[in-house]
Image (cartoon, grey):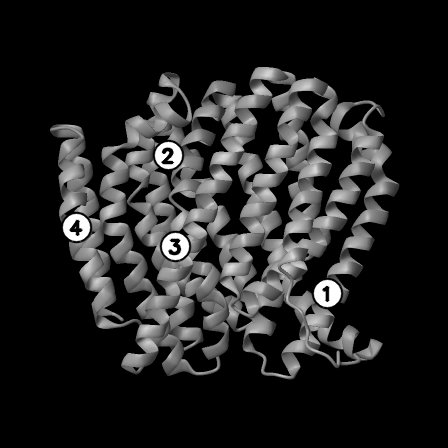
Amino acid sequence: MSNLTRSNVTQGALKALGIFGGVQMITIICSILRTKLIAIWIGAVGVGLFGIFNSAIELLSVIFHLGIRDSAVRDIASSQQPNTNRLIIIVRRWALILGAIGLIAIVALSPLLSNFTFNNYNYTYAFIAIAFIIFLSSIQNGELAILQGTKQLSRLGNASVWGTVIGVIISIPMFYYWGIDSVIPALIVYSLATTIAVLSQRNIIAKPVPKIPLKETIDKGKSIISLGIFLTASMIVNNLVAYLFMTYLNNVGDTSIVGHFQAGFTLVNKYMGIIFTAIIMEYYPRLSQVSTSAKRTSIFVSHEMTIALWILVPVISIFIASSQLIIKILYSSEFIVILPFIVWAAIGTIFRAISWCMAYVILARGDGRIFLLTESLSAITCLTLNIVAYTYWGLNGLGVAYVVWYLIYMLIVGIIYRFRYNLSLGKGVLRLALLSTFVALISIVGYFVLGWYIPAAIGTIFIPIAIRRILRKK
């Protein structure tokens, strides 16, 4: 990778981190605000209904969208003009088709879904409304995939932020004045707001617009959907494993244990995962562009890993130092019991960063079966480790289980990366991974033995070092 290319890649990664790190933070703040207002003005019943309907929307989206959000990015990013414009039209058509199929199917099944979920048919119309939301989110996914695939990161960020903010702002008076009756209307308004925001940033195809015959739409769509089916299957496996472990915890413990685990897992996996989500937005389409070249792929993956690890070195230490404060702000003092869990699990984010960078090579190459295999092995490993860890060490053991899970996942993906694709990592990546792990361990030991100021000092020391190292990549 030439110095100019390396500089462009680093700038792209930092730009994505800046844009989507901010987007994720705003989204989280809006989510927290919405949940708190629902709890205050509607109560536990409102929170419960929102949780049930949002879970239903997530599950039905996985089933009917067939992974088009991720699979289309690969095809668009790796295409060349004028093929890109043709692909954009095809993706939009398929997003519309999948949305329409979901709409019709869910409307037809709405009485059964209501009865299955609530043991009555009183919420049939609610599920009909959800069918409309699934239709809109399919259109959103198509447009978001196009923006990401064409690397229009600013527009993608604007669409995500404005849709979320406007949707929450409009929902707030609905919660206050309509109470429990606002649940479904608020979900519809939120979906409409996010859809309008996305469409306002959509990629405009210059005229003359290419005419795409139906056969080409079907043939090209098959390649996109075929990868999407494997992505869908992998998401179903992960959701099933999460459900099984929650059920296990509820049976051997109680609902409060489930709540504590969910809170800790969200802190480490979702909030710490902001870094990964932000970087992946730029990394995945660029990786798809170079995926046919083994040498360029190896260099690019190693470069991205280096940036991610240098960001994590100070972030993990600061996260450990402020973990108790974060718990009190986002939850309450009741959740302090999850402190050892999230502190130990923080180390797992190092292995998660390395494994994610390699796993996206599988997607970039369109190797759906292998991706499903790796995700299934990961899910089974996670479930097994969590059950064993909780059985012997309780909630604290789940933090160590998280670390071992991602360590094993990293090894699984690493074997595929090396022996299936004949790719290798740069020499400096291993040294940096060891340094990151060592710094995290010292931060944890210092935190439990001497107090929060030890990891805080370590994080502060490494901030300028990390910045200097990252900028050296430019």
Residue labelled with disc 1: 92
In which quadrant will I find the C terminus? bottom left
**In the image, residue 436 lies at what x, y percent?**
22, 53
Q: Please tell me which of labels 3 and 4 falls first in the chain.
A: 3
Nearer the observer: mark 1 or 3; the answer is 3
Nearest the viewer among 235 and 283 is 283
Secondary structure beneath dot 3 equals helix
Q: Residue at the spot x=68%, y=77% of the render?
A: 206
Secondary structure beneath dot 2 equals helix
Residues marked 2 and 3 touching at CB (< 8 Å) = no
- Tell me if residue 19 can be seen: yes
Q: Please tell me which of labels 1 and 2 falls first in the chain.
A: 1
Q: Quadrant of residue 297?
A: bottom left
Nearer the observer: mark 2 or 3; the answer is 3
Q: Amino acid at mark 3?
A: Gly
Residues marked 1 and 2 touching at CB (< 8 Å) = no
- Tell me if residue 424 can be seen: no
Task: Quote the CA–CA distance across marks 4 and 2.
Answer: 28 Å
Q: Residue at the spot x=59%, y=50% of the render?
A: 235
Residue labelled with disc 3: 18
Q: Amino acid at mark 4?
A: Phe
How many C-alpha atoms fall within 10 Å of the one at disc 2: few (<14), some, or many (≥20)? many
Q: Amino acid at mark 2?
A: Leu
Residue labelled with disc 2: 398
In which quadrant will I find the N terminus? bottom left
Q: Is residue 115 left or right of residue 472?
A: right
